[in-house]
Image (cartoon, helix red, strand yellow):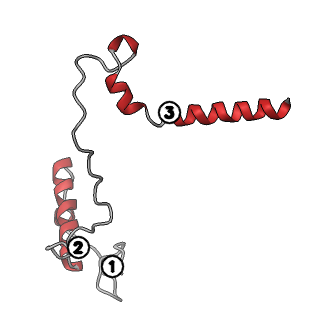
Amino acid sequence: MRVFGWWLWVSLGLAAVLCGCSPGPIIDRLPTDLMGLPANAPPRPATAYDYPAVHDMPPDRASVPMTDEEQLRLEKDLANERDRQEGRPTPAKKAASTGKKPPKDAENGQTAGAKPNP
């Protein structure tokens, strides 16, 4: 008797799973009183949608990356623009306002405190 009950539950579970796979076209035909689609629902498309081409690679970019000099110039321009908008004096104005030049590092000619570019 236990084997029969076990097979009964397995078959009912399998039937429920299989019924869950096919309600799409059936629901379209059910009346709205029996939980079908509402009357103002748009119709389904005649053909199924295509999946996006996920494995197609985009073409190479036409632009080239910036050189180190261009990137350094752009960073300096952005820092100067930020300082100007926030009302801070730029490094050139700071040195001019004190009347002193910033000290230079003897080894590599950079101002003291500035980190070297790798």
Q: Write the residue at 21% across / 48% down.
A: 86
Q: Which residue is mark 2?
A: 72
- Label 1: how many residues lie within 10 Å, few (<14), some (14-19) or many (20+)? few
- Per the image, label 3 sits on a secondary structure element best described as helix
Q: Write the residue at 23% across / 44% down.
A: 47
- Per the image, label 1 sits on a secondary structure element best described as loop
Q: Is residue 55 left or right of residue 89?
A: right
Q: Which mark is residue 117?
A: 1
Q: Residue 50, position in %: x, y? A: 26, 51
Label 2 close to label 1 by CB (< 8 Å): yes
Q: Hey, which quadrant is residue 65 in on the image? A: bottom left
Q: Residue 7, position in %: x, y? A: 74, 35
Task: Give the quadrant of the C terminus.
Answer: bottom left
Q: Hey, which quadrant is residue 54 in on the image? A: bottom left
Q: Residue 78, position in %: x, y? A: 19, 60
Q: Residue 43, position in %: x, y? A: 22, 29
Q: Is residue 82 visible?
A: yes
